[in-house]
Image (cartoon, rainbow, N blue to C red):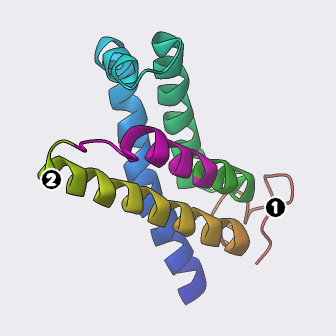
Amino acid sequence: MARNALLLVSRLLLAALFVPSGFQALSNIAGTTSYFAGLGLPLPTLAAWGTGLFELIAGLLVLVGFQTRIVALLLAAFSVAAGFIGHYGQGADDATLSFMHQQMLMKDIAIAGGFLALAMAGAGAWSADGRGLGIGADVT
C-alpha cells in the first residue's frame, strides 16, 4: 500500500508541473511563440502548439497513470531537451541570470531522473495502468 501511495504522489507532483505549463502555453500561444522565437527555434508557432499540447496531454496521462512507462520516458527526454534548449549557456553576460539558468537546467535534468524512476517502477495499482487499461499495464 505504501508503494502505491508513493507512486500516486509521485505522479501527482510530476503532473503538477506539466499540466499547468501546457495549459498556460496553449492559452497564450502568442507569448509562447515569442519565447520560442527568442530562443531561435524554427517554426516557433508550431513549436508552441506542439509543446503546449504535449505537456498538457502527457501530464494528464501521468496524472491518471495511463501508458505511464512510455509517457514517462517521453517526458524524461523532453525535460532534458527543454533544459538544454532553454537554459544551457543562457545569461552568460549576467552572473545572476547565468546562475539561474544553470539551476533551471539542473532542475530539468533532475525531473528527467524522476520520470526515469517512474518509467522503471510503473504507475502502481492506483492508476489506469494498475487497473489493466494500458498496453503493458502495471499489475503491481
The residues colored magenta run 76-92
Q: Quadrant of residue 90?
A: top left
Structural crowding at the residue carrying mark 2, measured as other residues with C-alpha within 10 Å and reported as few (<14), some (14–19) or many (≥20): few
Considering the numbered disc 2 on the image, is that residue within a helix, a strand or a loop? helix
Could you tell whether 7 is left or right of 134 in the image?
left
18, 102: nearer the viewer: 102
Coordinates of residue 107 in the picture (x, y in percent): 38, 61
Q: Is residue 74 magenta?
A: no
Mark 1 vs mark 2: which is more N-terminal?
A: 2
The reply to whether residue 126 is in sight is no
Res 69 → quadrant: bottom right
Q: Identify which residue is drawn at 23% across, 51% down.
A: 98
Crowding around mark 1 (Cα neighbors within 10 Å: few <14, some 14 to 19, many 20+) is many
Q: Position of residue 59 (x, y in %)?
A: 52, 45
**Residue at the spot of label 1:** 137
Specify the label residue 95 is tagged with: 2
- Residue 33's disc is none
Q: Give the secondary structure at mark 1.
A: loop
| Residue 139 place in picture, x, y as percent | 80, 72
- Position of the C terminus, as image quadrant, is bottom right
In the rendered structure, the answer to whether residue 45 lies left or right of residue 115 reads: left
Q: Main secondary structure of the magenta part?
A: helix
- Amino acid type, callout 1: Ala
